[in-house]
Amino acid sequence: MCGIVGYIGCKPAKPILLDGLLKLEYRGYDSAGISTLEKDGISVIKNKGRVNSLNEIDEINRLEGHIGIAHTRWATHGKPSTKNSHPHLDNSKTFSVVHNGIIENYNDLKKFLISKGYTFLSETDTEVIPNLIHYYYNKLDCKKGEKFLKAVKKACDDLVGSYALEIISIDYPDRIIVTRKDSPLVIGTSTCENYISSDIPAILSYTKKFYLLNNNEYVEIFENKVNFYDKNLKNLKKETKSINWNATSADKDGFDDYMLKEIYEQPKSISETIGSRLKSSDSLVNFDDINFSKKYLSSLQKITIVACGTAMHAGLIGKTLIENLCNIPVEVDIASEFRYRNPIINDKTLAIFITQSGETADTIAALKLAKSKGSKTLAISNVVGSSITREADITIYTHAGPEIAVASTKAYTAQVTLISLLSIYFAEILDSANYELIKELKEDILNLPNKIKKVLDNTEIIKQLANTVYKEKDMFFLGRGLDYSVSLEGSLKLKEISYIHSEAYAAGELKHGSIALIENGITVIAIITNPLLVEKSISNIQEVITRGAKTMIITNQKLDKKNYDYILEIPDINPLLSPILSVIPLQLFAYYITKAKGLDVDKPRNLAKSVTVE
Ligand code: AGP
């Protein structure tokens, strides 16, 4: 998964392109490149390494063109190298292309083009695109003004896979052509200039007015106008959408890292996600975009929740909430497993898909599968206009704002809050839960921002422990019920940014094998927030203490402090909602350990923000 950006307007393109690439580096950062239209033709500056390495190439200083495209790469086909980095030109250097996605049939197309005399410089799938455009460009017999667009369309008709493309040509020094299929692309517009990007935050500091593109739409972008075409090149009318995120939301607001900023944004992202869906503990939960009847909800045989990574962990909390409040059986699946296990679902199944980015390939494909089996599909996403929102029957949004750090934090608590509201919404339609319980849950949800502030004001002990144990190789997380589901998320956070091996266990399961791993001095983090499970949890923790473990307890229950090495108290809350509070110390624990190890918190190795390939 890569990041692409483009500019056409009254200013030199280079600085805007480089700025956009820096904001897209979380999407991939193994190589980068820029291409502008200069008086003497198309210029291409590209290099293996981070975006800033482009500034080490002298030629970049002579770029003055007002039209340009650029790319930061997450290698899929062809290892990170200068020749494999984008942009890619056709053999005649007439067209320059940047691409985000994967062309699955590129080998066949390459063979075809080689048979037509084309040669290839890179190992990438992308390089077939500019040559294919050139091939059709030379074959087309139509008015010059239409030839570029038609050649792009013809080439895309041959492509199988996912793509967001930006294309410039020396023969058309007044426009950029873009199109997309199953890869994200937005167009930002303002007076005498237009911007293109893989996501909104990268160009948010230039405009708040955006055009959102559907799959297989084509766009000709000029300095002062934007022409839209459907998949048959019929003219299309499009309205702009105003995105009221402020540009600073894409910057670090004075925090060292995006992850820490996003952890501290959770009171706000939670209250924005609640928004008008719950006004008071006496009012019913309302979802403008959902209109489920009691008849439909009562007819459901099951609800299936499908997602990946942290989003899947949010789904685990959703299972307990919906089953407890609505008495509807819920299955939770990892999307990449769901797709190939031939799940038993039908029109009596509601399928819920959780995805922050809305671009995760496995989750989108799982949704298409559920749809093909007749299930109604509901997506929970954080990105307006993202791919999954176009596939799902219904989409409800978390309003967590842009999440830049690869490790997901505020999106998780926003997803759990939203699925809590959704469970109450269903329960109120079904009249399936105790009134007092529902009222208490609504009060607790409305108080979440304040409760989270209390957790964030009490983090010293987390820092202390992190700075004590950051050199350790292995750690364990324990919990029962929802505390176990949260410990899975805590363990993932630690693994993905600190590279420390850690496991999360259902506390009661430990003695069935894994307790063999517990030895003197090993760190065990336990979560205890359910009064019904305190005694059981304490005895499980005792089992590891007797084998020499160092323990940190995150709890809102009255425990005997002297029995444990560290105790972090969090505010009281109904156990069904406790994950939203208990996860925050775990996010901070992973963060401070990673800082102590001097690692890149926001861009951990081997990872990307959303995985748009299978
Ligand atoms: C979490 O920190 C990771 N970035 C990763 O597990 C992520 O949750 C997963 O890739 C799903 O992403 P999505 O929510 O954008 O679909």
Image (cartoon, rainbow, N blue to C red):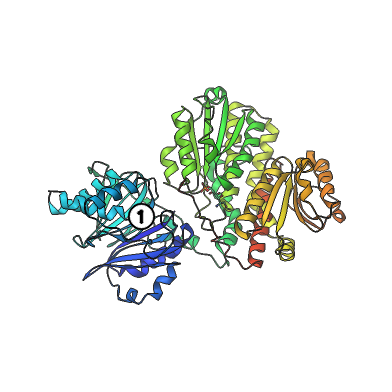
- Residue at horizontal 66%, vertical 29%? 433
Query: On the rendered structure, is 118 left or right of 6?
Result: left
Of 317 and 406, nearer the camera is: 406
Give the secondary structure at mark 1.
strand
One can see residue 396 in this view = no
Give percent across and percent down for residue 249: 50, 60
Question: Of 78 and 62, which appears nearest the observer?
Answer: 78
132 on left or right of 198 = left
Percent coordinates x, y for residue 336 in the rendering: 52, 40
The answer to whether residue 100 shows anywhere in this view is yes
Disc 1 marks which amino acid?
Answer: His
Specify whether tag 1 is near ligand 1 (CB below 8 Å). no
Please state if 561 lies on the left or on the right of 411 as rendered: right
Provide residue 43's location: percent of width, then percent of height.
28, 68
Left or right position of 43 against 394: left
Which residue does the image show at 57% across and 61% down from the upper left?
261
Residue at mark 1:
99
Corner quadrant of residue 597 = bottom right
How many numbered callouts?
1
Report which quarter residue 11 is drawn in: bottom left
Q: Percent from the top left, x then y, of residue 380?
A: 51, 42
10 Å crowding of disc 1: few (<14), some (14-19), many (20+) = many
